[in-house]
């Protein structure tokens, strides 16, 4: 059965923003930040990647190239009505955004990487996770689904309860998949392997926002990107969130900083004077 298109689009000004959800995720996880950026005057698209918002079998039947094609199509639609486009994404979506920037430098003027995930190495990941690549290659591993567990990427307990209820309902459009097919995880690794050698080609300005206590992807991900990206990087480290920073406790800060970054590309805004290769690090205190 065909999957319905659940992409989100907000029409605004001549600056376009493409937001890409994570692996097994949904455009809904980008909705709040999209609405905030749109309210600031931008045209915003939250695309739905191929195979997503359906079943695990739908996702397992796609490859990372299919996901990338979805993002590239959404970029083309924004270009039709916008003078400039910034691309961003959450988790795997951040890696997809980086590939767009590396492969399409004339079409992408800036990148927002939210909880970028090159490796699953956060504090909730088991020590034996290095065996996953071997396991997925076995007959049992090829049929395996990785089920999401506590804390489900969310530190705020109230929001987590809402998320878990949506996950358990089986409506993947609202909360994404509760379990991720092993084939999809394999495709993520293949995407990462393709993107890492391209990082130095990304000369555009990049904003990285990641939680210090990210249970899925440690700060080593952000640090690696800072060292290997080819242009200026601005990094914001959150002290009161887990992996899903677009819906967790400090989502307001994520929205505000992302909107400010987007606004900096508008011609009427103050010209960016940050030298190439510079890195600014802002550490926020925990919310009380």
Image (cartoon, rainbow, N blue to C red):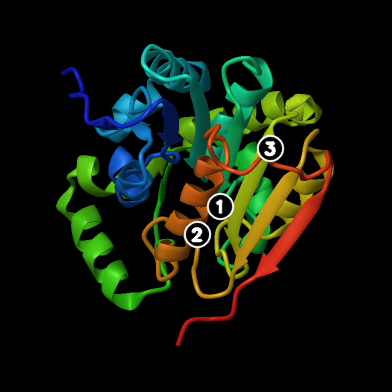
- Of residues 233 and 212, which is closer to you in this image? 233
- Of residues 168 and 266, which is closer to you in this image? 266
Residue 45, quarter of the rendered image: top left
On the picture, is 193 further left or further right than 246?
right
Helix, strand or loop at mark 2: loop
Q: Residue 273: where, in percent of width, then height?
A: 76, 43
Instruction: Verify CB contact (< 8 Å) between mark 2 and mark 1.
Output: yes
The alpha-carbon separation of the residues under discs 3 and 2 comes to 23 Å
Label 3 belongs to which residue? 205
Q: Which one is earlier in the sequence, the residue at label 2 or at label 1?
A: 1
Can you see residue 142? no
Q: Using the image, tell me which numbered label, if any, was put on residue 243.
A: 2
The alpha-carbon separation of the residues under discs 1 and 3 comes to 17 Å
Q: Which one is earlier in the sequence, the residue at label 1 or at label 3?
A: 1
Q: Residue 237: where, in percent of width, then height?
A: 63, 64
Label 1 belongs to which residue? 115
- Of residues 141 and 113, which is closer to you in this image? 113
On the picture, is 107 further left or further right than 272?
left
Q: Residue 178: where, in percent of width, then height?
A: 31, 50
Taking 75 as reference, is 16 above or below it?
Answer: below
Can you see residue 115? yes
């Amino acid at each position: 059965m065909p999957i319905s298109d659940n992409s989100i689009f907000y029409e605004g000004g001549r600056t376009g923003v493409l937001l890409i959800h994570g692996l097994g995720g949904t455009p809904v996880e980008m909705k709040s930040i999209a609405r905030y950026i749109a309210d600031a005057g931008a045209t915003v698209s939250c695309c739905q990647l191929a195979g997503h918002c359906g079943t695990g079998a739908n996702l397992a039947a796609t490859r990372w190239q299919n996901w990338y094609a979805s993002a590239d199509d959404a970029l083309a639609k924004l270009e039709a009505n916008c003078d400039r486009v910034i691309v961003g994404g959450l988790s795997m979506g951040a890696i997809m955004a980086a590939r767009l920037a590396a492969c399409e430098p004339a079409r992408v003027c800036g990148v927002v990487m939210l909880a970028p995930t090159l490796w699953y190495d956060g504090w909730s990941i088991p020590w034996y996770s290095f065996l996953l690549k071997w396991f997925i290659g076995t007959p049992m591993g090829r049929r395996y689904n990785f089920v999401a567990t506590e804390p489900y990427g969310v530190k705020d307990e109230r929001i987590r309860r809402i998320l878990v209820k949506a996950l358990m309902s089986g409506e993947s459009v609202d909360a994404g998949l509760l379990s991720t097919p092993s084939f999809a995880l394999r495709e993520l690794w293949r995407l990462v392997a393709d993107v890492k050698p391209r990082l130095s080609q990304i000369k555009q300005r990049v904003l990285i926002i990641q939680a210090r206590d990210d249970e899925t992807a440690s700060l080593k991900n952000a640090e690696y990107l800072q060292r290997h990206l080819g242009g200026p990087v601005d990094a914001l480290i959150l002290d009161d969130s887990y992996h899903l920073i677009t819906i967790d406790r400090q989502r307001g800060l994520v929205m505000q900083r992302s909107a400010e970054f987007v606004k900096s590309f508008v011609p009427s805004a103050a010209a960016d004077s940050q030298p190439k290769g510079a890195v600014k690090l802002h550490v926020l205190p925990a919310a009380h």
